[in-house]
């Protein structure tokens, strides 16, 4: 049976497993060791098959998870990556090892059916207590009716070291990370119904793709800005107000152009409490401009001074454009739903009878006033012409506007009606307006 996960469900699961890990740490236990003995559900064919032998020859770590992220199999390379033996992790939950700041973005990025192997970078807790950057990709299996998650982990720590930053290999890896991040955020923008999930993913994935530790989306609010999505900032950052003056995000918003701070300790323009709370040594901010208005600012930051390259700025602007398109699309969809609700309210409460008919004059919908005038229910009228249900010559077919008078035999007696036909309200549909004739 196909499974489906949502960002909200994954965040709830992740929060639960993170809390369990915190309780274990408080008791001096290793993450996952407090699970019941029968939770280590090693599946024999996962550990002994040809795929397991192949996985052991890979520099990457391969794992098989349940949709809820319980680890069913993991290759022995996990010990090199995170210091745990594979047998220690079988039956544990992978969410317990994810840093709390990355939970929201990872939940958004990993929700199905959008999850399709596009890599993201997240921070995980090593057995020695340190935090390591990992590149993570996952894909549902089997394709037709997925029951499991096949996952791949790779060391992402090396390319974050300053000594590797200038090498050709590091530059190529950086380009791939940026391309993957844009692809993933675009995929989420197209597929996720809630804009908050897109903002959470953009804040985290944009920072991660640039090798930075913190990212945020700040929306325009109350004469300034307010943090709506954040990753790598303190837990109370979301909802925090940010002034438009003497802050990097404020500069980007006010100027409508990117703002850079390669070395925050020497930047006399700023007194930025938000960046200070993240221990930032550098930061980059770009405005998020929508259709006809500014939505806010996308901000990324890292702990050490850094000169941002043109390609990095272009990447962040691309992400900002994707975010703006997502916000605009959802605003347009909400506006359309609002107009539909208004039209439905007018249709339902109008004193005149209204019938929506197809090109053959068959009823598609009718309001209560039309039911009263015709003496017939919507269920009786739907899919039929008035003359199929009632004794009447009323004919509402045709593609041209028209009006006239007709008599309808109702249970309470004959009734004269005035009618008018408004064609083309939607492709193939017309609106007929009915009114009782006086005199």
Image: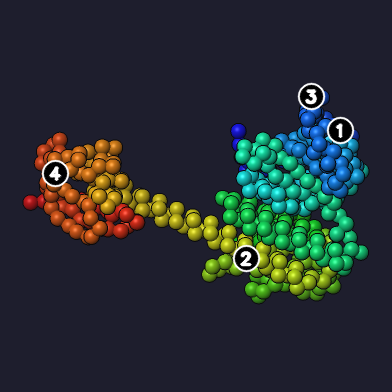
* SS label for mark 3: helix
Q: Which residue is mark 3?
A: 38
Nearest to N terminus: mark 1 or mark 3: 3
Identity of the residue furthest to the left in this view? 439
Q: Nearer the viewer, residue 412 or 94?
A: 94
- Mark 1 neighbour density, 10 Å: few (under 14) some (14–19) many (20 or more): some
Query: Quarter of the image holding residue 368?
Result: top left
Res 394 visible: yes
Q: Which residue is mark 2?
A: 321
Identity of the residue furthest to the front in this view? 50
Q: In the figure, is residue 352 to the left or right of 406?
A: right
Q: Which residue is mark 4?
A: 392
Contact? badges 3 and 4 (CB < 8 Å):
no
Q: In the figure, is residue 325 to the left or right of 58?
A: left
Q: Nearer the viewer, mark 1 or mark 3?
A: 1
| C-alpha span from label 3 to label 2 | 49 Å
Q: Which residue is mark 1?
A: 87
Nearest to N terminus: mark 1 or mark 4: 1
- Mark 2 neighbour density, 10 Å: few (under 14) some (14–19) many (20 or more): some
Residue 321 vertical position relative to residue 405 in the rendered view, above or below:
below
| C-alpha span from label 2 to label 4 | 58 Å
| C-alpha span from label 1 to label 3 | 14 Å
Where residue 330 sits in the image (x, y, percent)?
Answer: 53, 56
Contact? badges 2 and 4 (CB < 8 Å):
no
Nearest to N terminus: mark 3 or mark 4: 3
**Residue at x 63%, y 48% (from the top left corner):** 114
Where residue 321 sits in the image (x, y, percent)?
Answer: 62, 65
């Amino acid at each position: 049976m196909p499974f489906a996960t949502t960002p909200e469900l994954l965040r709830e699961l992740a929060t639960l497993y993170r809390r369990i890990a915190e309780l274990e740490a408080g008791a001096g236990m290793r993450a996952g060791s407090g699970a019941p003995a029968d939770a280590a559900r090693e599946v024999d064919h996962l550990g002994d098959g040809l795929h397991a032998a192949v996985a052991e020859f890979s520099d990457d770590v391969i794992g098989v998870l349940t949709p809820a992220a319980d680890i069913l199999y993991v290759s022995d390379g996990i010990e090199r990556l995170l210091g745990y033996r594979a047998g220690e992790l079988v039956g544990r939950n992978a969410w317990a090892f994810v840093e709390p700041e990355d939970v929201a973005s990872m939940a958004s990025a990993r929700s199905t059916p959008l999850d399709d192997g596009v890599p993201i970078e997240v921070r995980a807790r090593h057995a020695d207590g340190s935090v390591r950057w990992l590149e993570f990709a996952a894909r549902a299996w089997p394709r037709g009716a997925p029951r499991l998650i096949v996952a791949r982990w790779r060391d992402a720590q090396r390319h974050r070291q300053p000594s590797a930053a200038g090498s050709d290999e590091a530059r190529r890896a950086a380009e791939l990370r940026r391309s993957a991040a844009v692809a993933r955020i675009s995929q989420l923008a197209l597929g996720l119904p809630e804009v908050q999930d897109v903002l959470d993913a953009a804040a985290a994935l944009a920072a991660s793709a640039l090798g930075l530790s913190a990212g945020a989306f700040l929306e325009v609010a109350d004469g300034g800005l307010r943090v709506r999505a954040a990753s790598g900032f303190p837990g109370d950052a979301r909802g925090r107000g940010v002034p438009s003056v003497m802050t990097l995000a404020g500069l980007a918003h006010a100027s409508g152009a990117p703002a850079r701070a390669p070395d925050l300790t020497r930047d006399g323009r700023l007194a930025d409490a938000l960046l200070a709370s993240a221990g930032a040594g550098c930061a980059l901010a770009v405005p998020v401009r929508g259709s006809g208005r500014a939505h806010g600012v996308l901000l990324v930051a890292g702990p050490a001074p850094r000169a941002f390259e043109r390609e990095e700025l272009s990447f962040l602007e691309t992400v900002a454009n994707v975010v703006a398109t997502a916000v605009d699309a959802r605003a347009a969809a909400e506006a359309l739903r609002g107009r539909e609700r208004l039209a439905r309210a007018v249709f339902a409460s109008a004193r005149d009878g209204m019938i929506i008919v197809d090109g053959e004059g068959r009823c598609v919908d009718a309001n209560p006033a039309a039911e009263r005038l015709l003496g017939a229910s919507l269920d009786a009228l739907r899919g039929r012409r008035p003359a199929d249900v009632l004794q009447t010559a009323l004919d509402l077919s045709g593609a041209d506007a028209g009006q006239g008078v007709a008599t309808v035999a109702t249970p309470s007696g004959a009734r004269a009606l005035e009618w008018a036909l408004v064609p083309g309200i939607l492709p193939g549909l017309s609106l007929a307006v009915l009114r009782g004739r006086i005199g």
